[in-house]
Each structure stands twice: as structure tokens, then as C-alpha cells.
Image: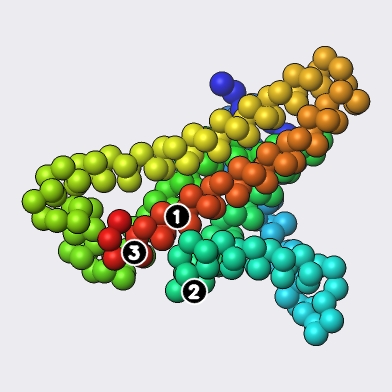
Amino acid sequence: MEEHKFVIAELINSFLGWVMSFFGYHPEHGKDIIPSHLVMAVLVTLILIVFFKLTVKNLDMFPGKMQNVLEMIYNFFQSLVDDMIGKEGRKFIPALGTLGLFIAVSNIIGLMPEMGSPTANLNVTVGCALFVFFYYHYQGVKKHGVWGYIKTFMGPVWWLAWLFLPIEIVSHFSRPLSLSMRLFGNIFGEDLVIIIIASLVPFIAPLPVMALAVFTSLLQAFIFVMLSTIYLAGAMAEEH
């Protein structure tokens, strides 16, 4: 299915096409130089960078509104990690926080006019899921060593390794699939419903659905981060 083109993506691609034609390279007509979902993903990243730069720059003993929001976000991730992993897991807050905020903002930005959710594209959700997959395995190997981490896949006793090992391998390789498909399916379906309703009854009718979509967008980001934290907890545990 052809990807929907957003205004900001068309403007950026038009500008890049003009720059490339200036240097003698003429891109194929009607073909995007940068896909729309990638443009939106970069935009979300820039929004987060600007937010954190402005907030961290003005830290104060008496926090303002932006600092209060930042502290609430940090406390949320700290509480989640402490409950599932323990204080040892606080070193994962930067990775989990960055991932969670990227997904949350990506989900919500698609509700704005002429914007689109990067997470409504399977390439983005697969990228996020693969990051989680490699990250928690890396942390597991880092803590237990290669052989020690492999042994955690073999069950509580050695003579059951033949049973536990293939089950664990299938389980772990299914995780990126479930993470990516769950997030993609929910956000793509959510955006599609809003587009259909807006095309039938514009202006008023989509508003209740969009209000619900804000909640579900945050919920999907929370589920993604919660599952990622569970996977990290399993990788760090002595037996799982």
C-alpha cells in the first residue's frame, strides 16, 4: 500500500529534490527521497531533543512547569524499573525512557492535522522491537557472560535442557514480532478509524475518537515499555 504523504514530508522532499537537482542529480519524479514515516520519526526526535535541552538548561530548586513534567516522567520510569528489576535496573532508565517517550510522542503526533504517526508504519515498530531484543540480550550477556547467559535458557536442571532450550529460543524470537505487530496494528488501526470518521462527518464527529486515541496512544507506549522492562528483568535474573 502506498504511504500517505504529509505536508511536512512533501516540503522536505521538495527541498531535497531542488538541492539534488542543483548538483546535477534528478531524483525520480513522484518518488520520495526520504519516506514520510522517516521524516516524521526525525521530527519526533527533534521535538524530544528540544524539550529536554530547554528543560535541563533551566533546572532550578523551585521547578517550573517543564521541570515538573520532566521530574514526573523520570519518577514514572524509576518506579516502573524499581518494581520490576530493582534499584540495579535504574541504569536502564535512559534507554527505556528514550524509547518510551519516542513511541508516545510518535503515537500522539499522528492526531495532529497533516501529521502522521511514525509508529503506524511497520518499519518503525520493527526497529523499536529489534532495539529491545538486542539490548536486553546484550545486558544479559554482559551480566552473566556468554555461557552463563545461555545456561539460563536451559531450565532449572540440566537434564531438562533439551525441553527448555527450544521453547526459550522460540519465545525470545517471537518477542520482536509481538512487540512490533501489536504497536503497529493498534496505531495504524486508530489512525485509519479517525480518517474514515473525519471523511464521513468532519470536524465534530472525530473529536471523541481522537480524545480516546490520546489515551490509547499513551497506553500502547506504556505496554511497550512495560514488556521491555520485563524482558530486561528476565535477562538480569539468575534464573528465568
Q: Position of residue 224 (x, y in %)?
A: 54, 47
Looking at the image, residue 177 lies above or below residue 138: above
The amino acid at mark 3 is Ala
> Around disc 3, counting alpha carbons within 10 Å, would you say few (fewer than 14), some (14 to 19), or many (20 or more)?
some
Counting labels gives: 3
What whole-number distance in Å separates the C-alpha atoms at marks 1 and 2?
14 Å
- Circles 1 and 2: CB distance less than 8 Å? no
- Residue underneath mark 2: 87
The quadrant in which the N terminus is found is top right
Q: Residue at x 64, y 55 (%)?
A: 101
The amino acid at mark 1 is Ile
- Residue underneath mark 1: 230
Q: Residue at x 28, y 40 (%)?
A: 170
Report the front residue among 144 and 80.
Answer: 80
Residue 55, which numbered label? none
Quarter location, residue 236: bottom left
Quarter location, residue 45: bottom right
Which element carries disc 1, helix, strand or loop? helix
Report the front residue among 146 and 215.
Answer: 215
From the viewer's perspective, tell me whether residue 121 is left or right of residue 180. Answer: right
Looking at the image, residue 54 lies above or below residue 125: below
- Residue underneath mark 3: 237
Which element carries disc 2, helix, strand or loop? helix
The amino acid at mark 2 is Lys
